Image (cartoon, rainbow, N blue to C red):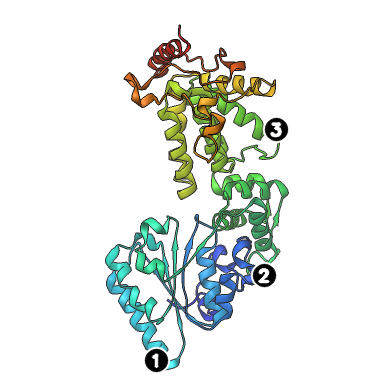
Amino acid sequence: MDSLFDSAAEEATPQPLAVRMRPRTLDEVIGQRHLLGQGTPLRRLVESEAPMSLFLWGPPGTGKTTLAYVVSNVTKRRFVEISAVSAGVKDVRAAIDDARRELGMTGRQTVLFVDEVHRFNKAQQDALLPAVENRWVTFIGATTENPFFSVISPLLSRSLLLTLESLSDDDVRAVLERAVSDPRGLGGRATLAPEALDHLVRLAGGDARRSLTYLEAAALLADDITAEVVEKAVDKAAVRYDRQGDQHYDVISAFIKSMRGSDADAALHYLARMIEAGEDPRFIARRIVIFASEDVGMADPTCLQTAVATAQAVQLIGLPEGQINLAQAVIHCALAPKSNAVVKAIGAAIGDVRRGLIGQVPSHLRDAHYPGAAKLGHGEGYKYPHDYDHGLVRQDYAPEQVRDRRYYEPTRHGAEAPVAERWSKIRDFLRGS
C-alpha cells in the first residue's frame, strides 16, 4: 500500500483519528525521548540517505507504526506495509520484487514495514534476508515480543534493535490535547473537560492509539466531552483512582491485606480496580513479588517463583494479556499457606546488627586464599561439611555475640512444616543440644 501521508488517499477515505494524528516528523513524536534526541541512532539513520534495517520492540500503542510512517515521510520513500498475521512468503517476495523494480526504474527507495513480525515463521523471515542484505528496501519490523526469542539470528544481526517504552501519563495527555486542538484532529470543535481527560489517560494505559480511539468515540456523542460522555462512549466506568493520592495507597493496601487474609475473590477485585484505573502493571507485579516472601515465604516456596515469573511476563507482554498472569499470581498468593517467618528472621538479624551485636568472624571461617592468610591463622581448623555424614559438622559459625540468637523461627504451615522439623534438628546438632 502507498503511504497514508498521500493527500489524495486521505481525501478519498476519511481516516480514523489515530491515523490522522500520526506525526509527520520526528519532532512531532510524543514520548520515546531516548530514541529521538539529537545524535541518536534513529535520528542519524533518518537524516541519512542510506537504506537501513530496524526492529522496533515495545508494547502496543507506543508508536512503532508511527515511527515507520515518519521514516517513510521524512525520507520521501515509498511506504509498503505487510501484516505478518495474514501475509505469506509469496506476499513478502512480491513486495520485495516491487521495491526492486521501483528502485531500478525511478531510483525511489521503499520502506517495507512488517507489523507483528514475530508471527512470521522461519521461512517467511528467510525471505526477507536478501532484501535486507542487498539493501533493496529499508526494512522495519514491529514486534511486541522479545525479538531475541522470535526473530532469526541472521535477520536480527543485520538490523538495529530499538526498544520503545509505554507512554507516560503526561505523554498520553499531550497526545489527547493535541488531537483536540489540531486541525487534523477535532480542530477545536469539541471541548474536553479535565475529568474526562483524566479518565481517558487512565483508560489508555500508556497506549496512544487507544486514547485517540476513545476520544474519537466520545466526540461522536457530544461536543462537550465530560467524564460521563467518555463512560458512555467506551462503556467503562470512570474508576476514581489517583495514582499519586489516597486511592492508590488505599487500594494497594486492601489488595495486599486481602491476599494475606487468603480471600482470593477480594484480592482479584482490587486487582481489577487497579488495572481498570490504569495502574502500572509492573508496580502491581513488584508488590506481588514482595508479598511472596513477606507473607508466604517457606510455607510455599513456589509462590516466589510464580511471582517473579509474573513480573517477567508483564514486562515482556504488557497489558491487556498481562492481566491473566497477574491474576494467576494473585490467586496463588492468596490461597497459599501463610508464613511471615522469613521477614521476621531478617528483621531480627538486622535489628541485632544495628544494636551493635556484630563481633568478629571466627578465624576458621575467614578467607584463607590470599598470601599471608595462613600466618594469621585464617581458615585454620575449618571443617569441610561435605567430608562428614549428612553434610553436617559441629563447629561455630556465628560470631560469639550472637551465637545463641535465634532468627528463623519457622511456622508449621504448608511446606514450612518439614522445613521447621529439619531446621530444629540441625540447630540442635550444631549448638550441641
Along the polypeptide, which appears first: circle 1 or circle 2?
Answer: 1
Splitting the image into 4 quarters, where does residue 313 fall?
top left
Q: How far apart are labels 1 and 2 at the CA level?
A: 38 Å
Left or right of 222 on screen, residue 148:
left
Q: Tag 3: Cα neighbours inside 10 Å, few (<14), some, or many (≥20)?
A: few
Q: Amino acid at mark 1?
A: Gly
Residue 162 percent coordinates (x, y) = 51, 63
For residue 267, say whether it is visible: no
Along the polypeptide, which appears first: circle 3 or circle 2?
Answer: 2
In the picture, the quarter occupied by the C terminus is top left
Q: How many marks?
A: 3
Residue at point 36% right, 22% down? Answer: 391
Q: Which residue is mark 2?
A: 183
Q: Which residue is mark 1?
A: 104
Q: Which mark is residue 56?
A: none
Q: How far apart are labels 3 and 2 at the CA level?
A: 38 Å
Residue 222 percent coordinates (x, y) = 64, 54
Which label lies toward us, 1 or 2?
Answer: 1
Q: Amino acid at mark 3?
A: Asp
Along the polypeptide, which appears first: circle 1 or circle 3?
Answer: 1
Contact check, label 1 and label 2, Cβ < 8 Å: no
Q: Secondary structure at mark 3?
A: helix
Q: Secondary structure at mark 1?
A: helix
Residue 321 percent coordinates (x, y) = 44, 45
Residue at point 36% right, 83% down? Answer: 98
Q: Which residue is mark 3?
A: 246
Splitting the image into 4 quarters, where does residue 20 fall?
bottom right
For residue 77, say whether it is visible: yes
In the rendered view, tell whether residue 197 sits above or below residue 116: above
Splitting the image into 4 quarters, where does residue 306 fall?
top left
